[in-house]
């Protein structure tokens, strides 16, 4: 017998939102928080949530940047860490191969 004990969210989409206005990021955080809220409704056990962060999401236009969400001023990465049970950081990048 198999059991689902968690849900992982890979969020490549946020890479396109890093340099947008705060309200766009806040809307996205609200949607991510809905995932946690819905997972918490699991009956008969805990459905853990896991999230994959981009390594540069704490910056805006290349500079560390905090904004308010749910009464706290944090970077986007820090806000996301507070939402999910666990996180990983994606550190891969595109490299140019030179001969």
Image (cartoon, grey):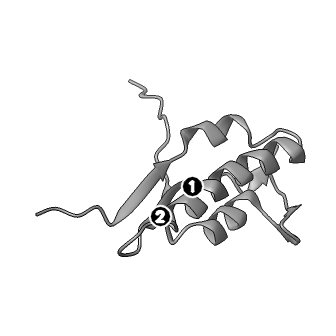
- 77 over 20 or under it: above or below: below
Q: Residue at x 85, y 62 (%)?
A: 66
**Position of 81 compared to 61: left or right?**
left
Camera-side residue: 72 or 1?
1
Residue under the point 83% across and 67% down = 70
Q: Which residue lies furthest to the bottom in this view?
A: 45
Frontmost residue, 41 versus 47:
41
Q: Name the residue under label 2.
A: 49
Q: Where is residue 6 in the image (x, y as percent from the top left)?
A: 37, 63
For the point 72% across and 46% down, the residue is: 28
Label 2 SS = strand
Could you tell me which quadrant the N terminus lies in? bottom left
Q: Residue furthest front?
A: 43
Q: In which quarter of the image is residue 69?
A: bottom right
Which x, y percent locates residue 85? 51, 72
Q: Is residue 35 left or right of residue 16?
A: left
Q: Quadrant of residue 72?
A: bottom right
Look at discs 2 and 1 and give the one toward the viewer.
1
Confirm or deny contact between disc 2 and disc 1 (CB under 8 A).
Answer: yes
**Image x and y of residue 56, in percent:** 65, 52
Q: Residue furthest top?
A: 99
| Nearer-N-terminus badge (2/1) | 1
User: Which residue has dot 1 on it?
Assistant: 35
Residue at the image point whose x is 60% and y is 37% from the top: 13
Query: In the structure shown, which secondary structural element does the residue marked by tag 1 occupy?
Result: helix
């Amino acid at each position: 017998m198999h059991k689902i004990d968690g849900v992982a969210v890979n969020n490549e989409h946020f890479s396109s939102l890093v340099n947008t206005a705060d309200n766009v990021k806040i809307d996205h955080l609200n949607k991510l928080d809905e995932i946690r809220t819905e997972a918490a409704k699991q009956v008969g056990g805990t459905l853990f949530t896991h999230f994959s962060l981009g390594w540069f999401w704490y910056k805006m236009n290349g500079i560390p940047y905090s904004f308010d969400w749910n009464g706290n001023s944090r970077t986007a990465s820090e806000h996301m860490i507070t939402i999910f049970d666990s996180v990983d950081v994606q550190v891969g990048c595109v490299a140019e191969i030179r001969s």
